[in-house]
RNA sequence: GCCCCGGUAGCUCAGCUGGAUAGAGCAGCCGCCUCCUAAGCGGCAGGUCGGACGUUCGAAUCGUCUCCGGGGCACCA
């Protein structure tokens, strides 16, 4: 619909330019938008006002030239010039009625477009460290990332969804050591457990598994474990315990605990996400970057290009040359590569896989990281504009009025699993995706847990269920589901509620397009609320199953298309469309 | 100190790539089920769009400054 009007306008502009009626040096990117007021037609265009400045002529005069040059169209009823120079388009009833047959013909494809043109996109999201269960903060990234993947696919992109598994580094060592200390406790030792080790109960669970499988074979007395370690600085102390664990257990013993912990926690995350309806095409291991030499390769590349230098026994990357605030270490003085080094290798690897665009969804706390990753991409000779980093702000949890403190290390958090169990997947996902990602979110557990109608997801789903119910009534009354969706058959749809619904339905493709371009799935959620509202209003104002066969058929065709769009839209944000509620 | 995000109705948020009279849900008040699910519908009330200055035909939207709230500024991941 909108594209059609665009074509008409572009055609008119060309006509004017060619005839020399208006000297247009360059055509501005004008806007063609849905009118806010009904008195302003269906679409409004600001092109005349945009041209007025350069053409040095009154906008209304230019508007008249354009209107006169517009080709005739069966979709356009009339065109008016209004206000300071808006060109308002009024569409014909046929143009709207034809949407119904379009929707029913295209089915799940109605609303899809091809702005992506098959471009390959790698979308990475969640990527939480496997150091514990996913909590409600991760849930937001999961819901957002998954919805974005669906929207981009609907927009013609070829999307790969990936989870980067941080299965290397100090945090994982802390996990392994935490498990071992709990294991020693289970062996009967009285362990003074460090406050900065992981506190969660799941550590006990993994320790119990170790104890069941290994019995006392990994046992060492506490005196031996803590001997000579100074507890002045907690982090140094913890590092000391880690080193001691590796030393006492040897590669095989320590590796066994490390792998068991990683596998258990990762599997837990996998199950959580799967249960939440969030799927991935690939789980990418950070450790694999080390073992297959990718990290060394990336560092060698940077050295070769002269971006690394040695200082204080460490290797630094001069990211400041690419706009970062300060240079960053890639190889520590102890010889270990940093997390940043892995990430450089990872992103280089992503480019080498041949994607046209990379999208990373990170928590907002990582925003300081964007500059250095972009610096790395530039330094390696890649185009850093191809990487889009989307930062998801925190969800602050409330129980009623009270803020819920959260910390993974202390084990004090509400898990995604708990949330799903109490709120349900649909409500949780709709809630998450109803805020644009850069918006801070107050997540009130009391509100989300209550099955009240405060939650808009029920409102939208209820519209779908009601339409399904009408279908059931039709079947019971043996009225048959045969629908004639031709424009001729729909001419009887003359009620204002019906016109409103048709307008809403015609907007859907524009909403999907905008959601894809701007990476804003929340637009789908808001649109669905509008559409459901249009339907509920209609439902209350008119009967669908009426004696008059022509009207009954037409109304049925209309609500069938509403049902289709609700179902498609809900699917885009990963929410189910129930047949009954 | 520097950087990012936010400040719109009592509350939670849309609108922000400049457009014509700033929207929705919840909460409040008043109505609507002999009728396809009342998890619904209609109506009323509610606003210095944090503040100031600027850009322009036009600013909630863009720029500068400022106030308030959240987050980030590691040889951690």
Image (cartoon, coloured by chain):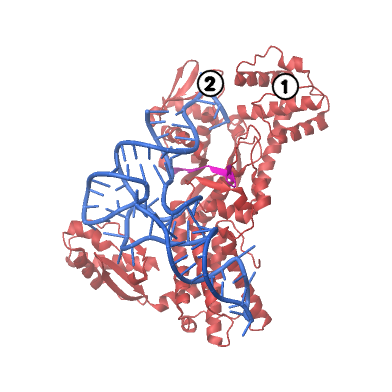
Chain colours: A red, B blue
Counting residues from the start of the chain, the first of labels 1 and 2 encountered is 1
Residue under label 1, please give it: A192
Chain under numbered label 2: A
- Where's residue A182, x and y in %? 75, 27
Image quadrant assignment for residue A235: top right
- Where's residue A375, x and y in %? 42, 33
The residue at the point 81 percent across, 28 percent down is A214
The residue at the point 62 percent across, 56 percent down is A426
The secondary element bearing badge 2 is classed as loop
Residue under label 2, please give it: A332
- Where's residue A250, x and y in %? 73, 21
Magenta span of residues: A386-402
Give a yes or no on whether discs 1 and 2 share a subunit.
yes
Report the front residue among A177 and A288: A177
- Where's residue A401, x and y in %? 57, 45
Q: Does A389 appear above or below A146?
A: above
Q: What secondary structure characterizes most of the magenta part?
A: strand
Toward the top, the furthest residue is A228
The residue at the point 61 percent across, 32 percent down is A287
Looking at the rendered image, the quarter that the N terminus of chain A falls into is bottom left
């Amino acid at each position: 619909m909108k594209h059609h009007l665009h074509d008409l306008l572009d055609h008119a502009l060309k006509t004017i330019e060619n005839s020399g009626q208006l000297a247009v040096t360059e055509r501005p990117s004008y806007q063609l938008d849905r009118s806010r007021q009904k008195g302003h037609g269906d679409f409004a265009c600001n092109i005349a006002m945009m041209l007025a400045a350069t053409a040095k002529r009154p906008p209304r005069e230019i508007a008249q030239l354009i209107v006169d040059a517009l080709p005739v169209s069966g979709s356009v009823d009339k065109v008016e010039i209004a206000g300071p120079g808006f060109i308002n388009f009024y569409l014909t009833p046929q143009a709207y009625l034809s949407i119904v047959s379009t929707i029913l013909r295209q089915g799940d494809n109605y609303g899809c477009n091809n702005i992506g043109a098959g471009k390959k996109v790698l979308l990475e999201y969640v990527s939480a460290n496997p150091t514990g269960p996913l909590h409600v903060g991760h849930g937001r990234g999961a819901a957002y990332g998954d919805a974005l993947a669906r929207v981009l696919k609907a927009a013609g992109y070829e999307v790969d969804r990936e989870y980067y598994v941080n299965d290397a580094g100090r945090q994982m060592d802390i996990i392994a050591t935490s498990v071992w200390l709990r294991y020693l406790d289970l062996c009967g030792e009285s362990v003074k457990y460090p406050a900065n080790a992981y506190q969660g109960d799941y550590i006990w669970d993994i320790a119990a598994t170790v104890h069941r499988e290994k019995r006392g074979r990994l046992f060492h007395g506490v005196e031996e474990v803590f001997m000579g370690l100074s507890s002045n600085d907690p982090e140094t102390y913890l590092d000391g315990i880690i080193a001691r664990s590796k030393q006492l257990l040897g590669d095989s013993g320590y590796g066994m605990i490390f792998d068991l912990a990683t596998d258990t926690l990762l599997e837990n995350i996998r199950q959580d996400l799967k249960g939440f309806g969030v799927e991935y095409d690939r789980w990418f291991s950070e450790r694999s970057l080390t073992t297959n030499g990718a990290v060394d390769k990336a560092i060698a590349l940077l050295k070769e290009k002269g971006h690394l230098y040695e200082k204080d026994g460490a290797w630094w990357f001069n990211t400041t040359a690419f706009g970062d605030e300060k240079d960053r270490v890639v190889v520590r003085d102890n010889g270990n590569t940093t997390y940043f080094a892995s990430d450089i290798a990872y992103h280089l690897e992503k480019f080498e896989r041949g994607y046209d665009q990379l999208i990373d969804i990170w928590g907002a706390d990582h925003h300081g990281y964007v500059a250095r990753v972009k610096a790395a991409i530039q330094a390696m000779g890649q185009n850093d504009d191809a990487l889009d980093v989307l930062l998801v702000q925190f969800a602050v949890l409330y129980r009623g009025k009270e803020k819920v403190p959260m910390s993974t290390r202390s084990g004090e958090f509400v898990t995604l699993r708990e949330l799903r169990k109490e709120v349900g997947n649909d409500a949780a996902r709709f809630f998450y995706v109803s805020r644009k990602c850069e918006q801070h979110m107050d997540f009130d557990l009391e509100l989300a847990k209550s099955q009240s109608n405060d939650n808009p997801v029920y409102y939208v789903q209820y519209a779908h269920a009601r339409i399904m119910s009408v279908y059931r009534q039709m079947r019971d009354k043996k009225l048959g589901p045969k629908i004639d969706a031709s424009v001729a058959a729909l001419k009887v749809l003359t009620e204002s509620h019906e016109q409103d619904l048709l307008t809403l339905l015609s907007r859907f493709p524009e909403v999907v397009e905008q959601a894809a371009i701007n990476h804003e799935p929340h637009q789908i959620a808001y649109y669905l609320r509008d559409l459901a509202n249009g339907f509920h209003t209609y439902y209350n104002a008119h009967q669908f199953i009426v004696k008059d066969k022509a009207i009954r058929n037409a109304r049925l065709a209309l609500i069938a298309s509403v049902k289709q769009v609700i179902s498609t839209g809900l699917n885009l944000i990963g929410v189910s469309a129930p047949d009954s509620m």
